[in-house]
């Protein structure tokens, strides 16, 4: 008979959502939980699979369900809506078979851990007699804003000068809110998904957040008033917070593959804190003009820089600049970001402030210069600059472009010894608190242990019921 609880883990198929789910699952595996990731065949095919980091890799597996052939998606209003519908159709039908397969096996299922953008997974889990744990991959501050919108307690004014006051949060200007709330252009389906995250929130058996208590203390208290929530972040491999723990910096499943590993040798050749690391995550789509200004701004700083320009963005780079760029800079299509941020040569991170990048910079103690693009990033920037004071923000000109002078000025502010000192001190304070949260006995570690213990007791209850003699 099985002795370990078994959970299905369903990530939303974007890199920024996959990484925290994998890392949470690695932690569960280390506590004896068996995990099976499930995605669709087309996503599975495109994911680079690294050998699983965990010693107990026999407790981790992955399954792919067939892509949807349903017509429902064709009736959708836009490509995002079509995608959401076909992903849901594929998962619901494929997962039914997977659940049936495991229910009579030696590895019966206990629960489904699912991304908050897939709130319908909860009803599916409950229908199958399984528990459901939802994972939120954005800050509690941002989640609370969408919670208010779902409950109808926040109306957005289109007056840019107006401000919003919400429990547990600093006063927010309209532009500090998640961008989709004031600029939804073509993203209606994504906005609906973010609001709908809360449609099954109260019914979920566990509500897990990739953040930590001390980072978002007040807003977490507010969110936890209605029902229990648990912080489990920052979800980074343990070796990032404790050098004695063996491992590697890969998250394990990735849509991108670095063309070269030479960036580490290149970093090794540079002085301490002399390199600016530049990355705008897995989705950002900067205009050619903006990329050109970033390139010139980097040149103007006179610092070394390592810049991730994804394959799909590289054709936008101005060719006439590339020889200037390569002298002091290295451009790569992708890298192991955690390894780069851990490197002694990196002194600053020019970022779009996606939530994973923000937490990774905090836990690895790297000050940021932030250029938010959309979604939660606008709110994340406000938190980084005004709440935690771990970075500075570039300002766009009247045409919405961040000029080369602005890029260079803000990067220099963070990289130079005196002006950057206060920010560096703040980052180190948050780094210690982040490490404390995920280390043994810390708030996030305790919450993961509690979650794992509850999976074990649910598992035992199910088995005891099955083994108990039927009452007459
Ligand atoms: O060369 C690179 C660049 C990035 N990364 C990793 O990719 C992830 C990127 O995640 P994130 O920083 O959150 O950015 P996005 O990919 O843009 O993430 C999306 O998902 C996040 C979580 O919901 C949101 O906060 C973002 O706004 C949204 O754009 C991080 O773990 C990075 O370490 C690498 O490993 N190598």
Image (spheres, rainbow, N blue to C red):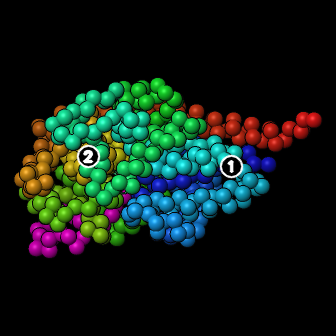
Label 1 sits on a secondary structure element that is loop
Residue ranking furthest to the right:
472
Q: Please tell me whether residue 234 is drawn above or below residue 346 in the rendered image.
A: above
245 relative position to 396: left or right: right
Q: Residue 277 in the image: x percent, y percent?
A: 24, 54
Q: Is mark 1 within 8 Å of ligand 1?
A: no
142 relative position to 64: left or right: left
- Is residue 363 visible in the rendered image? The answer is no
Question: Which residue does the numbered mark 2 point to in the structure image?
Answer: 182
Q: Observer-nearest residue: 402 or 266?
A: 402
Q: Please tell me whether residue 107 is drawn above or below residue 217 in the rendered image.
A: below
Question: Which residue does the numbered mark 1 point to in the structure image?
Answer: 128
Query: Does 462 lie within the magenta span?
Result: no
Q: Residue at x 71, y 41 (%)?
A: 459
Q: Residue 457 in the image: x percent, y percent?
A: 69, 35
Quadrant placement of the C terminus? top right
Q: Residue at x 22, y 73 (%)?
A: 315
Magenta range: 314-339
From the image, state whether disc 2 or disc 1 is nearer to you: 2
Q: Which quadrant of the structure image shows residue 189?
A: bottom left
């Amino acid at each position: 008979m099985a002795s370990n609880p078994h959970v299905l883990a369903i990530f939303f198929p974007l890199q920024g959502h996959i990484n925290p789910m994998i890392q949470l699952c690695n932690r569960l595996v280390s506590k004896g939980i068996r995990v099976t990731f499930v995605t669709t065949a087309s996503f599975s095919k495109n994911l680079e699979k690294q050998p699983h980091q965990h010693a107990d890799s026999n407790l981790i597996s992955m399954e792919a369900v067939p892509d949807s052939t349903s017509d429902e998606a064709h009736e959708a209003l836009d490509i995002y809506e079509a995608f959401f519908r076909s992903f849901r159709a594929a998962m619901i039908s494929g997962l039914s078979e997977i659940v049936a397969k495991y229910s009579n096996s030696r590895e019966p299922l206990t629960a489904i851990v699912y991304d908050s953008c897939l709130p319908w997974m909860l009803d599916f889990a409950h229908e199958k007699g399984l528990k459901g744990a939802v994972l939120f991959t954005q800050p509690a501050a941002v989640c609370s804003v969408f919670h208010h919108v779902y409950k109808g307690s926040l109306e957005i004014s289109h007056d840019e000068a107006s401000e919003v006051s919400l429990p547990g949060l600093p006063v927010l200007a309209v532009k500090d809110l998640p961008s989709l709330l004031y600029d939804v252009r073509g993203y209606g389906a994504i906005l609906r998904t973010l609001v709908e995250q809360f449609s099954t929130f109260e019914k979920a058996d566990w509500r897990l957040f990739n953040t930590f208590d001390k980072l978002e203390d007040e807003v977490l208290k507010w969110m936890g008033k209605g029902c229990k929530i648990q912080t489990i972040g920052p979800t980074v491999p343990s070796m990032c917070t404790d050098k004695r723990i063996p491992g590697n910096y890969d998250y394990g499943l990735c849509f991108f593959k670095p063309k070269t590993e030479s960036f580490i040798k290149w970093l090794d050749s540079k002085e301490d804190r002399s390199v600016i690391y530049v990355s705008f995550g897995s989705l950002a789509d900067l205009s050619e003009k903006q990329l050109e200004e970033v390139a010139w701004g980097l040149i103007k700083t006179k610092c070394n820089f390592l810049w991730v320009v994804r394959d799909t963005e590289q054709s936008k780079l101005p060719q006439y600049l590339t020889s200037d760029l390569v002298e002091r800079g290295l451009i790569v299509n992708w890298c192991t970001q955690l390894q780069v941020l851990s490197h002694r040569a990196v002194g600053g991170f020019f970022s779009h402030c996606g939530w994973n990048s923000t937490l990774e910079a905090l836990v690895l103690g790297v000050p940021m210069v932030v250029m938010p693009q959309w979604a939660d990033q606008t709110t994340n920037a406000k938190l980084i600059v005004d709440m935690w004071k771990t970075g500075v923000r570039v300002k766009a000109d009247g045409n919405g472009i961040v000029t080369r002078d602005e890029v260079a000025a803000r990067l220099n502010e963070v990289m130079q010894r005196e002006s950057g000192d206060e920010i560096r001190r703040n980052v180190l304070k948050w780094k210690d608190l982040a490490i404390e949260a995920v280390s043994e006995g810390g708030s996030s570690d305790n919450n993961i242990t509690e979650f794992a213990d509850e999976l074990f007791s649910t598992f035992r209850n199910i088995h005891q019921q099955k083994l108990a003699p039927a009452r007459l």
